[in-house]
Image (cartoon, coloured by chain):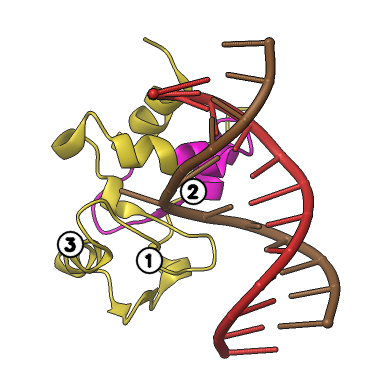
Chain colours: A yellow, B brown, C red
DNA sequence: CTAATGACATTTG
DNA sequence: ACAAATGCCATTA
């Protein structure tokens, strides 16, 4: 099964703790602009606890949504050491994980 | 195959 | 800064 969403999961698994990735960046890392499809994949998230889908946020630094409630997402991020204000990441750029872009 | 959906992004008012 | 409208891509019915 090498679907687009699986690519997202694999990429997400590469995200270390205490870091966050944006839908857009993920899509870009996959050489695509399907940030929407990325969100869709997370929503389905068949690999629920295996994939840190809660580390995925919007490109503007907002939390976005979450299947179990955005609040839960914020809580998890804070637990990882990320500072979150209402619905936005504080040191967003600092916690933003950059994917390795192969040449 | 066609239509509809969505945990988004960008532009315009 | 906020709200509304449009675009974009993959998945599912």
- Which residue is painted at 19% across and 37% down in the image? A48
Give percent across and percent down for residue A23.
49, 48
Please, is residue C9 above or below residue A36 in the view? above
**Residue indicated by mark 1:** A63
Q: Chain of mark 3?
A: A
Q: Which numbered disc flags the more N-terminal residue, 1 or 2?
A: 2
Label 1, label 2: how far apart the Cα atoms are: 11 Å
Q: Which mark is residue A23?
A: 2
User: A27 or A16, which is in the foreground?
Assistant: A27
Q: Secondary structure at mark 1?
A: loop
Q: Picture quarter containing residue A46?
A: top left
Distance (Cα) linking label 2 and label 3? 18 Å
Task: Tell me if residue A94 is in the magenta stretch.
Answer: no
The chain carrying label 2 is: A
C4 to A54, vertically: above or below: below
Q: Is residue C5 left or right of residue A78?
A: right
Numbered disc 3: secondary structure:
helix
Q: Position of residue B8 (x, y in %)?
A: 51, 55
Left or right for A77, reference A3: left
Distance from label 1 to label 3 (Cα)? Answer: 11 Å
Find disc 3 in the rendering and name its residue: A76
State the residue at coordinates (47%, 60%). Answer: A58
Residue numbers of the magenta segment: A15-38
């Amino acid at each position: 099964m090498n679907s687009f969403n699986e690519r997202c999961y694999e990429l997400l698994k590469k995200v270390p703790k205490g870091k966050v990735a944006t839908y857009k960046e993920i899509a870009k890392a996959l050489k695509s602009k399907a940030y929407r499809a990325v969100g869709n994949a997370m929503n389905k998230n068949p690999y629920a606890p295996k994939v840190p889908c809660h580390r995925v946020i919007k490109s503007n630094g907002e939390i976005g949504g979450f299947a179990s409630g955005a609040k839960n997402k914020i809580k998890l991020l804070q637990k990882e050491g990320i500072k979150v204000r209402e619905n936005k990441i504080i040191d967003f750029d600092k916690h933003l994980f950059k994917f390795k872009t192969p040449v």
